[in-house]
């Protein structure tokens, strides 16, 4: 008989077995036994100032490192505060594990103090969740949770752990392996489908590759590049796929969809073969479905069968891991399509409709310029987290992502307040890299309390607020589609520099274009967190733009 | 069109809720759902009858079911040979006893209780017969009807 350990200690030991280095969270009544063991455990605990931020930080850690991010909160409100972060991770297939305390088993269902039906609440926002009612199950559950979180299509897993189970003792045996009979993700493409795809590729005249976040998740960026170069086919990457293909590569088309490039959207519209890899045809990408790639045969490579033929009817589905399937395709393809005319046509589109913005005649700073300057000064090597809205789109359009896992953004759920805590997770996971949060004046205030976290642990993230005194993206829609009736979008902002300083964080305000360079330089040089409040053009719009529900080749602001 | 789908699932708490919320979250209505243990006590069988307006939605339902970690296999009986049954308990008004007795000869109907003003009938039949039987019984006057939902087994 081995020594008996309490549930709380089993959890901590299991996390150590899984090589967890950082834990993001917030204590409370129902997790006290766990925190007691964390007190001395060799896991670095990051106390965020709101549970939502803990979930986003775990998410930012996971996206930027490829490892599982772990967060912890107490029962009831602690757990419900995690849910926005869990949903964000779920929508973007991010492997995080959320541990929540629960009231003791005898009280479950009694409306006890700080009780919430957390497994019920999170059922539709997790890949899987567990309520552990018996301490004997705990080690296996943790092992399964890590395996499920990272394998197949990754996603968040929640473990709800009643406080009495944390105190029960049993022998600790961490399972070596696990077997879940009902869970067998398909990792390799079906040879028949691969053959069909290679035939379609051979016959294509105007092929386009559309790569999504799945390429980054499966670390298939090298295979993607080799594949695209082999078949001489242009590549567009979705918001989640930024960095899956080098932005400075001649075959690169930029982002498609609502705020994509004109040439990416034109290429898709005119293509006769669309090769989709690890993307799920979000409505922000496709626009009006009937007009999306109307002439194209569609090959769709995805590890999740439910993504295939969900939005777009697919001609050649290939279920499998992007890295394996692309590797298989590279091997099988012998006949290469002749795309020289097609590439020439795309080159013309690139020349005719470049991604641009009007610099002249502006008194205030252009937000695109701030992003370009961050790009230049970080040599394209930084990790960029974004909030949601205009700041997110400008970062996506004007920072050239040449490497995977450098762009952290809430794509599916579109969570304002994501970027700052995500940048905290990314920074602790990548201590040697520069991490910027490109924020808006609205979004930053959704988790601004995390200034206390970066200040406490001296986490040197740089916050660039693109401050236009508006909820800019909503204002843009009001300008374009609601006759400039700016309902509830004007913000009366605090003095962000003083707010930062109040938390012990260096802050700076920049109101003139000529000071942008210097400010970014100083922020990068400074060994600590740094907030810059850039006063940007108030009514600057994100262009080009496909109005919601329109065909993607009908863009406004960019085709003139 | 109505489809009969069978899912073998882990026999654990919470699995039914996962399956049910999968349907409700997408606004699909479940016509009937029958759950019970199989020959293996760790596995439950769920027989789900669902009205899917088109193939695409049916495919999504099956794939989403398969995606649930606790679901072991999903079988769609639509294009398969199978036997199905449903059990009904019905209280019918005792207006026309002779007619009811005739029905018990024509259909798999048993009179299991006779009260002063109504019969309690037990009906165990397949999906086609049940439609016919219900039509007949409605004519007499149904006081109360409860049904188990369809179960099915492949041939």
Image: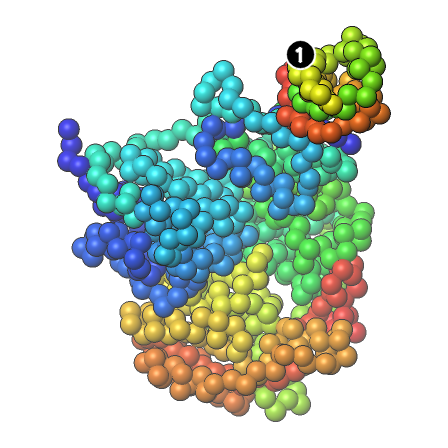
- Residue sitting nearer the eye, A147 or A512: A147
Identify the residue at image location x=26%, y=55%: A32
Q: Is residue A290 above or below residue B79?
A: below
Q: Position of residue A503 (x, y in %)?
A: 34, 79
Read off the residue under disc 1: B155
Q: Considering the image in quadrants, where does the N terminus of chain B appear?
A: top right
Residue, far front: B116
Can residue B58 be seen here?
Answer: yes
Identify the residue at image location x=69%, y=55%: A283
Q: Is residue B85 above or below residue A283?
A: above
Q: Where is residue A137 in the image (x, y as percent from the top left)?
A: 32, 35
Can residue A430 be seen here?
Answer: no
Question: In this rendering, would B65 be left or right of A80?
Answer: right
In which image quadrant can residue A142 be found?
Answer: top left
- Residue sitting nearer the eye, A329 or B27: B27
Identify the residue at image location x=48%, y=75%: A445
Q: Mark 1 lies on which chain?
A: B
Q: Is label 1 in a helix, a strand or a loop?
A: loop
Q: In this view, does A360 lie above or below A345?
A: below
Identify the residue at image location x=61%, y=82%: A490
Q: Residues within 10 Å of mark 1 (few under 14, many from 20)?
A: few
- Residue sitting nearer the eye, A406 or A112: A112
Question: In this rendering, would A451 be left or right of A384?
Answer: left
């Amino acid at each position: 008989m081995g020594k008996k350990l309490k549930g709380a200690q089993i959890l901590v030991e299991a996390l150590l077995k899984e090589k967890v280095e950082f834990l993001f969270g917030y204590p409370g009544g129902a997790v006290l036994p766990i925190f007691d063991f964390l007190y001395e455990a060799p896991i670095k605990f990051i106390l965020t100032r709101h549970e939502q931020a803990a979930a986003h930080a775990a998410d930012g850690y996971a996206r930027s490192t490829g490892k599982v991010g772990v967060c912890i909160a107490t029962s009831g409100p602690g757990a419900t505060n995690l849910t926005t972060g869990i949903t964000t991770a779920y929508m973007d297939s991010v492997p995080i594990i959320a541990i929540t305390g629960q009231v003791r088993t005898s009280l479950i269902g009694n409306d006890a103090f700080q009780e919430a039906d957390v497994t019920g609440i999170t059922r539709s926002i997790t890949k899987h969740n567990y309520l552990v009612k018996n301490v004997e199950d705990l080690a296996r559950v943790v092992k399964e949770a890590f395996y499920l979180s990272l394998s197949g299509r990754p996603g968040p897993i929640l473990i709800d752990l009643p406080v009495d189970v944390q105190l029960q003792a049993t022998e600790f045996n961490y399972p070596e392996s696990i077997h879940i009979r009902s869970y067998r993700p398909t990792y390799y493409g079906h040879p028949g489908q691969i053959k069909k795809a290679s035939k379609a590729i051979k016959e294509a005249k105007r092929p386009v590759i559309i790569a999504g976040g799945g390429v980054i998740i499966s670390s298939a960026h090298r295979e993607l590049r080799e594949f695209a170069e082999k078949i001489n086919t242009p590549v567009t990457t979705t918001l989640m796929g930024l960095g899956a293909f080098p932005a400075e590569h001649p075959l690169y088309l930029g982002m498609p969809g609502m705020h994509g490039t004109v040439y990416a959207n034109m290429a898709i519209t005119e293509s006769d073969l669309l090769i989709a890899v690890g993307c799920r045809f979000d409505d922000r990408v496709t626009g009006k479905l009937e007009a999306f790639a109307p002439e194209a045969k569609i090959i769709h490579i995805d590890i999740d069968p439910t993504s295939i033929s969900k939005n777009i009817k697919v001609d050649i589905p290939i279920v499998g891991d992007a890295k394996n399937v692309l590797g298989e395709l590279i091997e099988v393809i012998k006949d290469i399509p002749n795309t020289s005319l097609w590439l020439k046509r795309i080159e013309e589109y690139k020349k005719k409709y470049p991604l641009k913005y009007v610099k002249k005649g502006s008194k205030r700073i252009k937000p695109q310029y701030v992003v370009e300057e961050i790009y230049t000064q970080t040599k394209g090597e930084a990790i960029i987290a974004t909030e949601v809205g205009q700041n997110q789109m400008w970062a996506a359009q004007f920072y050239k992502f040449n490497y995977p896992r450098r762009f952290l953004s809430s794509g599916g759920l579109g969570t304002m307040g994501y970027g700052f805590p995500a940048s905290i997770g990314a920074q602790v996971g990548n201590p040697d890299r520069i991490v910027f949060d490109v924020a808006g004046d609205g979004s930053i205030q959704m988790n601004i309390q995390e200034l206390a976290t970066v200040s406490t642990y001296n986490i040197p993230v740089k916050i660039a607020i693109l401050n236009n005194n508006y909820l800019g993206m909503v204002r843009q829609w009001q300008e374009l589609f609601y006759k400039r009736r700016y309902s509830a979008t004007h913000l009366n902002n605090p003095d962000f520099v003083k707010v930062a300083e109040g938390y012990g964080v260096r802050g700076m305000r920049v109101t003139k274009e000529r000071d942008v360079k210097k400010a970014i330089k100083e922020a990068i040089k400074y060994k600590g967190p740094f907030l810059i409040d850039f006063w940007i053009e108030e009514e600057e719009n994100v262009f080009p733009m496909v109005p919601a529900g329109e065909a993607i080749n009908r863009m406004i602001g960019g085709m003139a | 069109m109505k489809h009969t789908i069978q899912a073998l699932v882990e026999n654990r708490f919470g699995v039914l809720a996962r399956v049910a919320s999968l349907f409700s979250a997408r606004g699909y209505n479940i016509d009937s759902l029958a759950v019970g243990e199989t020959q293996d006590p760790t596995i439950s069988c769920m027989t789900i009858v669902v009205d899917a307006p088109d193939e695409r939605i049916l495919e999504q339902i099956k794939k989403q079911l398969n995606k649930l970690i606790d679901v072991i296999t999903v079988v769609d009986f639509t294009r398969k040979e199978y036997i199905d049954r449903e059990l009904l308990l019905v209280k019918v008004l005792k207006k026309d006893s002779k007619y009811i007795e005739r029905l018990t000869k024509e259909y798999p109907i048993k009179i299991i209780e006779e009260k002063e003003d109504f019969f309690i009938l037990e009906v165990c039949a397949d999906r086609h017969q049940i439609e016919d039987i219900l039509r007949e019984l409605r004519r007499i006057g149904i006081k109360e009807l409860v049904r188990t939902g369809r179960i099915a087994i492949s041939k």
